[in-house]
Amino acid sequence: MSVSLSLTVNGKKVGADVDSRTLLVDYLRNELGLTGTHVGCDTGQCGACTVHLDGNAIKACTILAAQANGGNIVTIEGLAEPDGTMHPMQAAFKDCHGLQCGFCTPGMVMSAIDLVNRHPKASEQTIREELEGNMCRCTGYHNIVKAVQQGAAAMGK
Amino acid sequence: MGAPEQGVIGASVRRKEDYRFLTGSGQFTDDVNPPNHTHAVFLRSPHAHAKIRKIDTAKAKGMPGVVGIFTGADLEGVNGLPCGWLITGTDGKPMNEPPHPVLAQGKVRYVGDQVAIVIADTPNQAKDAAEAIEVDYEVLPAVVNCVDALKPGAPQIHDGAPGNKCYTWALGDKAAVDAAFAKAAHVSKLDIVNNRLIPNAIEPRAAVASFSRSDDSYTLYVSNQNPHVERLLMTAFVLGLPEHKVRVIAPDVGGGFGSKIYLYGEETAMVWASKRVNRPIKWAAERSESFLSDAHGRDHVTHVELALDKDAKFLAMRVHTTAAMGAYLSTFASCIPTILYATLLAGQYTTPVIYAEVTASFTNTAPVDAYRGAGRPEATYVVERIVHQAGVDLGIPQNEIRRRNFIRTFPYQTPVALVYDTGDYDQTLDEAMKMADVKAFPARQAEAAKRGKLRGIGYAAYIEACGIAPSAVAGALGARAGLFEAGEVRVHPTGSVTVFTGSHSHGQGHETTFAQVVASKLGIPFENVDIVHGDTGRVLFGMGTYGSRSLAVGGTAIVKALDKIIAKGKKIAAHLLEAAESDIEFKDGKFSVAGTDKSKTFGEIALTAYVPHNYPHDKLEPGLNEMAFYDPANFTFPAGTHICEVEIDPDTGVVGIVNFSACDDFGNIINPMIVEGQVHGGLTQGIGQALLENCVYDKDTGQLLTGSYMDYAMPRADDVPSFKVGTKVTPCTHNPLGAKGCGEAGAIGAPAALMNAVHDALSSAGVKYIDMPASPHRVWSAIQSAKRA
């Protein structure tokens, strides 16, 4: 069975008929070619697939594309300015060396932005607890925490 | 070498690779989508040990979208996956090396063993078809523990490995060790389990294989740490394909930690099948497959004894280890608990004689191979736990017992084959103690005690051997590969540079660090240097990245190529400046005639090489492109001290890390920011092993009980503290960069430091011994048992 989708992704209206069992992450990656959203565990644990749906961070591997119908989605590809200037949180991750292999990074950045929107002036402990749903095997989180703090400040949060 | 303000060596330059990763434009294997590609799914064994009576694929082959289904029977004529290191046992015989089929042949030997490759138009169609394959299994008893596997009557896993033994191997002078023990004033003893770990790179393994009829060639994208090694093993040993007809590309790779060194059955079957179905085939492992089928790490059971004299000087050490190989020998499995383990048992100490005996056994589990540190964390854990125990037994402070035994003269020949070229172990211990504020620890411990909490402090003074070498010695010890590295420096006519390296970056930041080295050496802007890696079609050759070898070995190969560029540049400059070659100096990007103001820039020399109008054609070829292979003279020996302070809640058994300080000596450092990041990550993996991670198979059924992130506890942001990291430098003496390697140190030192702290904390509760991971349940149970005792 197929369903008809109509949604906004990174500011653009998109629509398609997809198999009803299509996960949002597969729709983004395979139909729209937005391969910056990654699949790390298929079970909602690792957070590599995190995107924003109507301003909230969600895990795109545990939601059907159909459930996002009508929604406004922002992926990692939608953060930078049109001229390529990175979002302050992206810039903070680079400046603080908050990434190594780069695979968890898109999800981590999307979670970080959501985190600081919800928790302005978050303490280190709050940041660590809020990042519980995003795994990184490379950085030991030390520099990710620094990046979130620096990114929050740059965002005026 | 240039000064840090030039943005080169020694500066924390921000990474070139970050923009693409931060904006979603990285290209990982699963992002590669060739036109008309198919999808593969692997049917895996649900049993730990079973005979395959029959496989019926007829129904599955008729399912919608199915393009091809192949089983082990279809692959007859294809060889098994090779093991890259031949260990010779104490009996003088080669290790037992049973076949490791690409797809199961007649029998399955672990849960997750590949039985069939199913290829269809979509992943879901392939999954549906895989479910429709009927396999008639005769289930056999299984054994999952490496010690149990060696017991009489254990289920026999391979015909070619009687008693499930791969080898018994030994290193050191047994008679001298026995004699030293006979006159010891004190002997400390421990039984130690080094828990099995699942690597869990966040990018699951993936591959895309294509065949081209037009030139009979194959292209394989694969998430791998050493594409040239992958190609060599696959073509020459398994598929019998001409090497030049196979291009292997390891694009952006989302972490490896060892698990992506190896040649696996999946991508091998895909390359083979890509010709049969004549369409590209894509496979990306689901996480549950990664848990089942990635090569695991560690899994040792060890008895260690340390003999000391009356002054607590170490007289001798005796080690017996049983190590799991898993169901089959993975690419480097055999050398991990031998060559990379027993040789490290001297640690930082002058122990004059050491004897280590290692028995490796087959088990009905996923294969075991190198995982971050590979043998060296296991050795460090043995050495530093028994040293801690000796300190406790003799009532000597932990820093003091270490100092009494430190090696202080270099080069130092250990009794277990290695020659340490340089180090200063007092320096890293002193600094780590300052960072950890050890002086005030008793006050902190007393304060915690008032709150009913148990505080402990633990040390690990580790050593590791990186950049395994030289090839000739490794070959004599059984290596079936060389251990050099290759580098090529291509200077373009306008003076910008592309470097092709055989090292592979999967998080290490080589595109930045290597560019810093090149920019420094050539005196050109960092922005004018790009690094290419991970593609056998572009890079001459390479042995890849593992064992913290990239800068020390791969970086040195680049430096050797740069030396050739500069030497040729001097010849060109001598011609242009009408001077003797011996009078030309190269500094800060300029070739000058010594003692004059006559000079040519690097860019002018590059242009002359490619526009050779005024050129010494009688002596020199045009162009400016040089290659170098570098085979190191020795390992490098990073070392350091890690100190961990924990606070344990005796009511819950929860271990909290209050402070973790690491002072490491990695030799010269190119980019401190990247080095610190490597240490943070390594420490977290080490802490993961000590507190959280544990791979568990059901002992009767052989089912993997920790096959998801709900069951296997990965370190998350709130499980670890912010770290204090520092470095001291004794440059490596035998490579021009003076670099030693930093990738694994954290994972090597952390488990012992943390567990020594846990034991220190628990000593006041009467607990003598606890194995990793020190989970709340284990700690609480140990406290309760001690109360009852």
Image (cartoon, coloured by chain):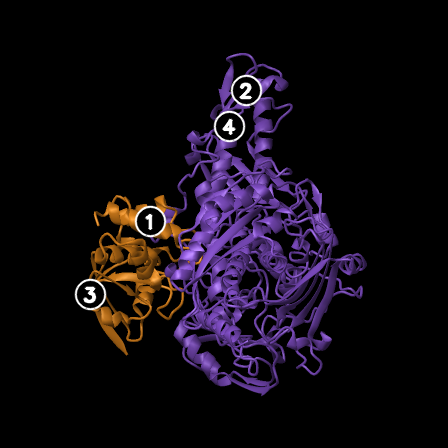
Chain colours: A orange, B purple
Placement of the C terminus of chain B among the 4 image quadrants: bottom right
Amino acid bearing label 3: Gly
Return the x and y of residue B704 as percentages of the image width and height.
Answer: 51, 76
Q: Circle 1: is it few (<14), some (14-19), or many (20+) Cα within 10 Å?
A: many
* Residue tagged 1: A147
Give neighbour class at mark 2: few <14, some 14-19, many 20+ (Cα, 10 Å).
few
Judging from the image, what secondary structure is the residue with disc 1 in? helix
- Check disc 2 and report the residue beneath it: B614
Looking at the picture, does residue B717 appear above or below residue B299?
A: above
Residue bearing the label numbered 3: A71
C-alpha gap between disc 1 and disc 2: 53 Å
Amino acid tagged 1: Ala
Of the numbered discs in the image, which one, if any, rests on residue B725? none
Q: Residue at x 51, y 30 (%)?
A: B522
Q: CA distance from mark 4 to mark 2?
A: 13 Å
Residue B134 location (% of width, % of height)? 51, 85
Alpha carbon of mark 3 to alpha carbon of mark 2: how far?
Answer: 67 Å
Q: To which chain does the residue with label 2 belong?
A: B
Name the residue carrying label 4.
Answer: B606
Q: Disc 4: which chain?
A: B
Q: Is residue B234 left or right of residue B1?
A: right
Query: Which dot, 3 or 2, sits closer to the camera?
Result: 3
Q: Is residue B246 visible?
A: yes
The answer for which chain carries disc 3 is: A
Check disc 4: other Cα within 10 Å, few if <14, some if 14-19, many if 20+: many
Name the amino acid, label 4.
Ala
Instruction: Kindly check if marks 1 and 4 are in contact, taking CB atoms under 8 A apart as contact.
Output: no
Q: Do badges 4 and 2 share one subunit?
A: yes
Of the numbered discs 1 and 3, the one sitting upstream in the chain is: 3
